[in-house]
Image (cartoon, rainbow, N blue to C red):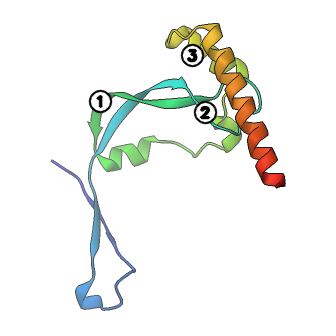
C-alpha cells in the first residue's frame, strides 16, 4: 500500500481550482563518493557524491518521518580533512597522488576565484 500525504498548493487564488501535491513512499539511494571540486574546501581534499548509487529499500513516508531524528547542524555534517582522506583511500581506493592533485587544483581554483572577486 502506498501512503500519500496531501498538501494544498497556495499558488492558486481560486479555491475551486485548488491543486494538490502528493508525497508517496521514500526510495532510498546510497551514492558512492569521489574526489570533488568544491571551491570552499579550505583544507584537505574536496569530496563529492558520485553518479553511481545502489538502490535501497522503499519506506512509507510516515515511517521515514518518524524515524529520521533531529536535524543536524552544519558543523555536525562537515567532514574533517582526515575523515575525507580516509573515506577516499579506504573506501574508494584512491591513491595519495590523486588526492594531492585534487588539492592542488582546488587551491588553484580558489586563488582564481579570489583574484576574480577583487577585479
Q: Secondary structure at mark 2?
A: loop
Residue at the image point whose x is 74% and y is 32% from the top: 108
Q: Quadrant of the C terminus?
A: bottom right
Pointer 1 with pointer 3, Cβ within 8 A: no
Give the Cα distance between marks 2 and 1: 25 Å
Where residue 18 appears, x then y in whole percent?
Answer: 27, 82
**Relative to 42, residue 82 above or below:** above
Q: Secondary structure at mark 1?
A: strand
Residue at the image point whose x is 67% and y is 43% from the top: 74
Q: Nearer the viewer, residue 8 or 94?
A: 94
Give the Cα distance between marks 3 and 2: 14 Å
Pointer 3 with pointer 2, Cβ within 8 A: no
Side of 16 where 96 appears, left or right: right
Residue 100 seen by the camera: yes
**Relative to 72, residue 89 above or below:** above
Return the residue at label 3: 88
Q: Give the number of the disc on residue 55.
A: 1
Q: Secondary structure at mark 3?
A: helix
Q: Give the number of the disc on residue 37.
A: 2
Amino acid at each position: 500500500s502506498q501512503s500519500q500525504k496531501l498538501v494544498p498548493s497556495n499558488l492558486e487564488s481560486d479555491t475551486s481550482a485548488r491543486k494538490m501535491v502528493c508525497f508517496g513512499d521514500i526510495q532510498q539511494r546510497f551514492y558512492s563518493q569521489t574526489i570533488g571540486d568544491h571551491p570552499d574546501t579550505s583544507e584537505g581534499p574536496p569530496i563529492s557524491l558520485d553518479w553511481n548509487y545502489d538502490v535501497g529499500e522503499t519506506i512509507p513516508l510516515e515511517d521515514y518521518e518518524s524515524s529520521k531524528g533531529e536535524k543536524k547542524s552544519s558543523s555536525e555534517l562537515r567532514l574533517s580533512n582526515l575523515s575525507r582522506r580516509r573515506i577516499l583511500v579506504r573506501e574508494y581506493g584512491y591513491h595519495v597522488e590523486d588526492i594531492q592533485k585534487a588539492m592542488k587544483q582546488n587551491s588553484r581554483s580558489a586563488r582564481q576565484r579570489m583574484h576574480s572577486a577583487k577585479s
